[in-house]
Amino acid sequence: MPTPKRWHVVASAVTLLIAATPAVTASAGPTGNDRAGHGRAEWAGTWAAAVTRGNTVGLTETGLNNQSIRMTVQTSVGGPRLRVRLTNLYGQQAIQVGRATIARPNTATPDDLSDIVPASVRQLTFSGAGSTTINKGAELLSDPVAFPVAEQEDLVVTLYFPVLTGPVTFHGQSRVTNFIGATDLTSAADGTGFTIRPNCCWMFLSGIDVERRATPGSVVVLGDSISDGNGSTVNADRRWPDLLAKRLIDARPEPRTPGVLNLSLAGNRLNHEGTEPGAGGFPGYYELGPNALARLNEDVFPQTGVRTVITHLGINDIWMNGDSPEAIIATLRQLNRQVQARGLTSIAGTLMPYEGNGGPGVWTPEKDATRQAVNTWLRGPGRAEFDGVVDFDAVMRDPAQPSRLLPAYDSGDHIHPNDTGAAVMANAVPLKLLGL
């Protein structure tokens, strides 16, 4: 039986065009002070994505072969130099990176988001070399490159893989159109060579750091599809963590603004694996990621400069698996303890209503009672354990029907916020909890 489109979208491979690529400007090799830069400069995370192994069918299973992928990301904070993190964490073999570049998008051609400004292209190097191998299960940091980055600026990373990668390591719901084409297109200014244009994924790319002075660190959002941006406008960066980053920038100008790193995964659960099926015929996928506790050591603690963690998880455990309040609360408590044990500020969000989403069995009065029980605990005993609680439920529910989202904030599927709802969520986070 084919997978229903409402659950999953994967781009399929097609015959690709061949495009010539001009030379690019190489970055400087590593310096003797990469860790701290010059003087009081420090590295801080400006963008990151949680990654999983590829799914069992489609492009993420077969991988890339003599192909380039061009991906757009948006920073949260800026700095004069940057470094890029590539990942093969879930790969089944070592992979070769033939060339990697970073550039600025060409905003003069907004209808073709694959175009970049030729003069902005910088080659990324790894220990001074323009090509590299990422071992199975490994990640690599590029050498620092002089590339001034502004707050909430779009950047374009292009990677070329000369031989078959096998199953990819990827983030499945980018809410950004990315581009795949044949041969080395890492310095191609226009997008004519990119013939696959999925709206789904970042591949082999997991983070970008910038060099800053006296950085206040970063805020990590550990969530599910509500934080990952399902329901938000594609290519608009209107996820609620994006809007929280803007709010922080407006409240505290550089260099005191903390970065915001969205480590959410659509479909992620506290107590279950991504491949486990759920109610309503949901089949489960690798891209939903492992259980949340298993994600801490990869998705949260290694992030550059992390100081605060906002956890917003549990609704999928309710509707997919019918978990009890006790099971959900126990895992939230354990997440909190591990985050606080690292000396980090730990914040939780209440679970939002979702009546009307899905078919029979997805929402039931019993499941809503579980959600309300978890929220009651978060507002009471949980508030005393966490360093703070954000009451997303209170600001997003319909006062006339508390088990439903307010229609003005509903993307249409009755569980994910639209752009307006995402702004309400971002505004609900008390800035004092983030040290502002």
Image (cartoon, grey):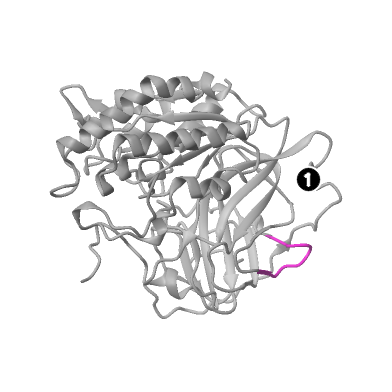
Q: Residues within 10 Å of mark 1 (few under 14, many from 20)?
A: few
Task: Give the answer, above or below, for where 308 lies relative to 155.
Answer: above
Can you give x and y, in whole percent of width and height, for residue 12 in the image? 36, 72
Can you give x and y, in whole percent of width and height, for residue 382 in the image? 42, 24
- As for residue 127 lying within the magenta part, the answer is yes
**Residue at 44% of width from left, 54% of height from top?**
290
Q: Residue furthest left?
A: 360
Q: Going by the image, does 279 lie left or right of 59?
A: left
Asked if one can make out residue 351 in the rendered structure from this viewpoint, the answer is: yes
The stretch of residues the image draws in magenta is 123-134
Task: Give the answer, above or below, for where 77 lies relative to 401.
Answer: below
Can you give x and y, in whole percent of width and height, for residue 375 in the image? 32, 27
**Residue at 30% of width from left, 38% of height from top?**
418
Asked if one can make out residue 395 in the rendered structure from this viewpoint, the answer is: no
- As for residue 81 lying within the magenta part, the answer is no
SS at mark 1 in the image: loop
Given the image, on which type of amino acid does mark 1 rest?
Arg
Q: Going by the image, does 150 lie left or right of 291?
A: right
**Residue at 41% of width from left, 81% of height from top?**
15
The residue tagged 1 is 35
Can you give x and y, in whole percent of width and height, for residue 181 in the image? 49, 72
Q: Going by the image, does 319 lie left or right of 343?
A: left
| Viewer-nearest residue: 116 or 414 | 414
Task: Give the answer, above or below, for where 137 lies relative to 103.
Answer: below
Q: Main secondary structure of the magenta part?
A: loop
Q: Quadrant of the C terminus?
A: top right
**Residue at 54% of width from left, 74% of height from top?**
165
Q: Quadrant of the N terminus?
A: bottom left
